[in-house]
Amino acid sequence: MLAPMYTLVDRAELEDFGICYDTEIDRSRISLAPLARLSDARAAAVNFRHRMLSGKRVRYYQTFNLVRVPYPTRYGLLNAVQGVSPLMHILNRLTVVQFDSSAGLKTLLFSPSDIDANAETPFFKNFKHRAPTFFQPFFERLMAPRYASVASALASVNILPEQVDYISYDHLHTQDIRQWLGSGDQPGFFPNAKLLVMEEEWRSTEALLPPQSYWYCPHGIEGVHPHRIVMLENTAILGDGIALVKTPGHTEGNHSLVVHTDEGLLVSSENGVSADNFAPEHSNISGVRAYARATGQEVILNGNTLERGLDQYISMIVEKTIAGPSVRNGHFFNVVPSSELQSFWLFPGLAPSFSFGELKYGNPVCRS
């Protein structure tokens, strides 16, 4: 049996979806000199921020707590912490956005995690199996407590599965998309949805090296029909007040969600897992502020794979430049991690200096 042929969607078809490319940031990152690449990307991010703020806002934006998971501190705050727990808790959230486009009202789900299927990711599976036998029955309740599922979150705001037009992830670490889009003869939970993904991320996920595969869900994209996949070449404007910006580095094809809300531009990805990652000079976490001062680093990477570390560093500066300062706390930025550091009594010394929590702007448009 031949493998499915996944191809780029041409620009005319993208226009039918109401999507268009904005390539200034992408074109700014071509210099072979890292310092010049950063300077050019920062300037392009300022321009992009102005364009987004001059446009309309999305109709509706809401985040929902899904599940907490343990995560090594040495990855979440790369090299920057001292004398704290070797593990942290990060809280994965679903983001639901509704927006107008030239193709009509659209609904996008960002980071819709299939919690049960994603547990097959080698890192998390091995972590659980290393726990003592007596602790296994309590593992999920204590170490990986669940708050909601994607289905229950949508039901709570009366959004129907057939109403979802797009799903997207900043990258495909730990993700199994088959329940949502279908695989083989099995229909998907979202009958009309398409995955929006950068071409580099999809191609990379098809052909992983061992340092990558530890973080990808086995068979997570296997058998999904090509017509459910929209591979993007560049930063894409999806509609009024919403874009997917290419932010490579954490993975080959990482991208960030940018949304214009009543609180300004909110930028989401997992390049960083806390506000501290993007403003380490103001962090209250032990060692982070001193590390930033000693090294001159503007951001602290979330570095579990470090596929392209310098590019990730530039991408994080692009993210916080687009986002701008938070109106809630001017020391930090409007970067809302898709999985955000949370304090937990078992992991002392690891409370974020500033946290967003669940957010809501506007009201969903529900279809009966």
Image (spheres, rainbow, N blue to C red):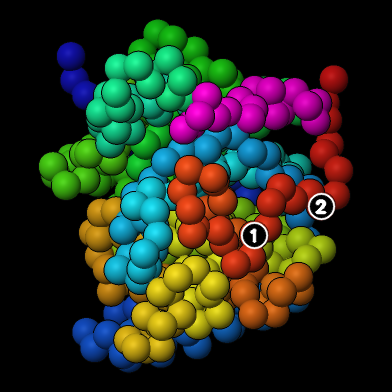
Question: Which range of residues does the magenta coloring cover?
Answer: 141-158
**Residue 368 image point, x, y percent:** 85, 20
- Residue 51 falls within the magenta-colored stretch: no
Point out residue 129 in the picture as x, y percentages from the top left corner.
27, 24
Which residue: 49% across, 68% down?
A: 285
Q: Is residue 144 magenta?
A: yes
Relative height, residue 153 to residue 282 (above, below): above
Which percent across, then down, holds residue 344?
54, 46
Q: Judge from the rendering whether residue 206 lies leftward or rightward of residue 272; answer left or right.
A: left
Q: Quadrant of the N terminus?
A: top left
Residue that label 2 marks: 361
Residue 124 shows in this picture: yes
**Residue 53 vs residue 302: left or right?**
right
- Label total for image: 2
Residue 205 to residue 287: above or below? above
Left or right of residue 297, residue 206 in this image = left
Work out whether mark 1 precedes mark 2 in sequence or the reverse, and give the earlier one. Answer: 1
Badge 1 density bin: few <14, some 14–19, many ≥20, Cα 10 Å: some
Residue 24 appears in the rendering:
no
In the picture, the disc for residue 355 is 1
Q: Identify the amino acid type marked 1.
A: Ser
> Residue at 49% of width from left, 58% of height from top?
350
